[in-house]
Amino acid sequence: MPTILGQNQYGKAENRVVKITRDGDTHHIKDLNVSVALSGDMDDVHYSGSNANVLPTDTTKNTVYAFAKEHGIESAEQFGIHLARHFVSSQEPIHRARIRIEEYAWERIATSDGNSRFIGADDVKHSFVRKGQETRVTQITYDGGSWEVVSGLKDLTVMNSTNSEFWGYVKDRYTTLKEAYDRILATDVSARWRYNWTSDEQRMPNWEKSYEQARKHMLQAFAETYSLSLQQTLYQMGSRIINSRSEIDEIRFSLPNNHHFLVDLEPFGLKNDTADGAVYFAADRPYGLIEATVLRDGVEPKIPVDMTNL
Ligand SMILES: O=c1[nH]c(=O)c2[nH]c(=O)[nH]c2[nH]1
């Protein structure tokens, strides 16, 4: 049966690029998922396997990261236009470029001594929470006599674009990780906290206010902790809640370490270091997973170790 080639396109999909721009101490984030699809004179590669017209998808990926560094990301539209024009105008066989971009929005975290709307406090300048993300959860158990209320949230995505280090760790023959003195710290917070309200005799907490306050303290502790490890940040987040909310006795966290790797742009003659605003590859997996419970001293832990389906 004779066949002919129909519509075809190729490129690198879902390039996760995070660009930090430093304006003094104030950082700005652009967080994009960029997919490149190119088409043109690509009959030969399909029919005979000749790659003579094929710009590698790997190159399209590198271009995304290099452009982020070299030209910055003013808007997703401007960035996409720039990329599309580049591919079509620099490669004769490429006649059409389709750039799809998803942009993830971030808001500044309001810290304890400031308001996110005016940037005054030191610590709001580099701490962000992803817009409109989290799911609030609760589990109520009652046996006719006593109550157990465990509430919390999942998918609350936060990022510090500086004030995070990781060094001084154990090194064995398999360790290749470089010590970091200024890295991005990002996680999707999953937390469950247990209320010490257990009987109808006790005054019931104001659940709405308690949730809002627990969330606020957690975010502030994340933003305000100069972090030497995600474990240390976790403990600060938990103890901030226990110390400021008397109705909560125990809190458990499951925190993925959402790794952001500095892209090596040396081959393109571009310096990419944290000091003057860098471009990162936001990896999705594998990820470190840091989990721990923080308790009021003297109370029995009751939140299960594997709490995530709770
Ligand atoms: O905050 C961190 N804690 C770790 O335990 C760890 N391990 C690792 O490779 N990177 C990190 N970062």
Image (tube, helix red, strand yellow):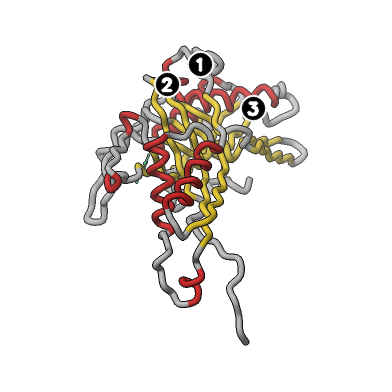
Q: Quadrant of residue 143?
A: top right
Q: Earlier in the sequence, mark 2 or mark 1?
A: 2
Q: Secondary structure at mark 2?
A: strand
User: Identity of the amino acid at label 2?
Assistant: Thr
In screen coordinates, is 194 left or right of 263? Answer: right
Within 10 angstroms of label 3, few (less than 14), some, or many (20 or more) residues? Answer: some
Mark 1 or 3: the one toward you: 1
- For disc 3, the marked residue is 211
User: Identity of the amino acid at label 1?
Assistant: Ser
- For disc 2, the marked residue is 26
Tell me if label 2 and label 3 are in contact, CB under 8 Å.
no
In x, y percent, where is residue 284? 48, 49
Within 10 angstroms of label 2, few (less than 14), some, or many (20 or more) residues? Answer: some
In this view of the protein, can residue 53 be seen by the observer? yes
Question: Between marks 2 and 3, how big is the CA–CA gap?
Answer: 29 Å
- Please name the residue shown 26% across and 56% down the image: 174
Within 10 angstroms of label 1, few (less than 14), some, or many (20 or more) residues? Answer: some
